[in-house]
Image (cartoon, coloured by chain):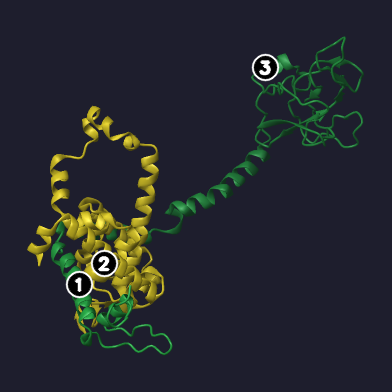
Amino acid sequence: MRCSSCGLPDHDLLAIGDGEPAARRQGEVTPPPRDCPVCRRRLFEFRRTANVLRIGTPPRDDPAGRAAIRARLERVAARERVVWWRRPAATVAALPLVVLLLLATVDRLDLPLPGECPECSAQQTDDEVTRHGGVSQPSRLSGGTRIVAWSFPIGLKQWSPTAAGDGRQGSTRLLGERIGATDRDPETRWRSTTGSRSTRPPLRVLPPGYPVPGCASQSPRPVLVGGGHVPCR
Amino acid sequence: MTQAGNVVETRGGVVAVPTLDAASEVACFATLADRHHAALLRFLRRQTGDTELAADLAQETFLAAFRCRHQLRDETAFMAWLLGIARNQLRMEWRRRRMRKLISLEWLPPGVEACLPGMRRSDATRACHERDGIQRALDAISPTLREALLLHALCGFTGGEVAGILGITPEAARKRIVRAEAEFRRHYTANDEVADDALL
C-alpha cells in the first residue's frame, strides 16, 4: 500500500521508522515522513500497534523454567563428556562389527547346525529332520525354478527358490530337478539324480567330502537338508 | 561493553563467549539463557497462545542452541540466532501436533464434545482466552505474518533484522510486517475496542 498523499510505500515508511535505508527505485526520492501528515499518521499507527503488543505482553519471569533449563544444560553437557563407546550412536555403529566378530568365532567352533542330528545327519529325511527339531522345507515353490538352500555359519538356514540356482550354492545341494505336475499326477514332483521321484525337492545333508553327482566340487562341511531320496555313499 | 562472570555483553544486549572449559561453558550459557529467557518466552507465548507450550519450547530452544553453540557465527546476533532456533522448534511442534491430530479425536464434529466432557477446554482457560483480545487478533492472522509482526513489534528487531531471522529479503520482510500490522489492527479493533482504548 502507498501513501495517498506522497505515494511512499508502506514498507519503505517502515524502514524509515526503523532508521534503516529504504529500498529506493530509480528516480524515486523518499520524502521525509514528517512532511506528510498521512505518513506521520501511518507511522504513529505502527508504533501504536507495537505498544499494544508490548504492553499487552509483559515479560514474565519464570525462575522455575530457568532452573529447569540450567539443570538440563548440565545434563546435556555431562552427556557430551561421556566417552565415545558409551554414546548410543557409537554403540549402534559398533554393533554390526561385534556381530561379525561373533559370527566368525562361532563358525570356527564348528557347532552342529540346528536340526542336525550328530548321529545320522547324512541320512535324515524330512520326518527325521522334524523329529530332530530341524527346519522344514519351503511349502510353496514357484514353477520352473530350482531350490537352493543357504546354510549360514551359525546354523541359520534360509530356503529360497531361485531361477538361476545351479544346486551348488552354499554347502547344500539340490540333487535333482523339478519335473512339474502332469494331468495324471497333479502333485508337483521332483526327480532326483538317481531317477527316483518325490513330491519334495531332493535336498540333502552332505557330509564333508561327499561326492555330489554332477558336481565337480565337494561339500565343504556337513549341512542339514531334508527330504527326498538320495543314495547314500 | 559490560562483563558478567564469563559472559561479555556488548552494545545490543548481545553476548560473546570466550573459549572455556566444559563447566564454565555451561555456566556461561546458563547466564545467557537467564538473560534472554523472558524475551524468548514472550515471543513464544504470543506465537503459540499457550503459556505451557511456550515454556516447553523455550527450554527446547535453549537446549538446541547449546548443542549447536559452535555454529553461532555472529556473536552480536545471539538473540536473532536464538529466535531462528525457536522458529524451528515451533515448526516441529506444529508438525507433531498435525500428526497427532490425524490420529486423535479432535477431528470429531463440535457437537460430539458434549458427549465427551474430558475433551472440552476448561472454563477457566476459555475465559482467559476470551479476555485476551490481543491473542485473539494474533490468532486470526497467519503464522507467517504473525511471526514477522512479533519479531518487529514485540522483540524490537528492525525490518532488516527480521529479514535475517526469517531468511527473506528486507523488502519482503517489511511487506510482511506491514500486512501483519494492518491485519492485526483490523482484528484487534473489531474484536476488542474497549481493550484497545484501555491499553492506550
Q: Chain of mark 3?
A: A
Mark 2 or 3: in front is 2
Q: Position of residue A161 (x, y in %)?
A: 76, 30
Could you tell me if the residues under marks 1 and 3 are in contact, i.e. CB atoms within 8 Å?
A: no
Q: Is residue B185 above or below residue B156?
A: above
Q: Position of residue B61 (x, y in %)?
A: 31, 60
Pointer 1 with pointer 2, Cβ within 8 A: yes
- The kind of residue tagged 2 is Glu
Colour for chain B in the figure = yellow
Q: Which corner quadrant of the image does residue B151 belong to?
A: bottom left
On the image, the x and y values in percent for residue B39 come to 21, 66
Q: Amino acid at mark 1?
A: Glu
Q: Which residue is mark 3?
A: A130
Nearest to N terminus: mark 1 or mark 3: 1
Near-viewer residue (B77 or A76)? B77
User: Subunit of mark 1?
Assistant: A
Quarter location, residue A213: top right
Same chain for labels 2 and 3? Say yes or no. Answer: no
Label 2: chain letter: B
User: Circle 2 is placed at which residue position?
Assistant: B181
Q: Quadrant of the C terminus of chain A?
A: top right
Bin the neighbour count of mark 1 within 10 Å (Cα to Cα): few under 14, some 14-19, many 20 and up: some
Q: According to the image, label 1 marks what residue?
A: A45
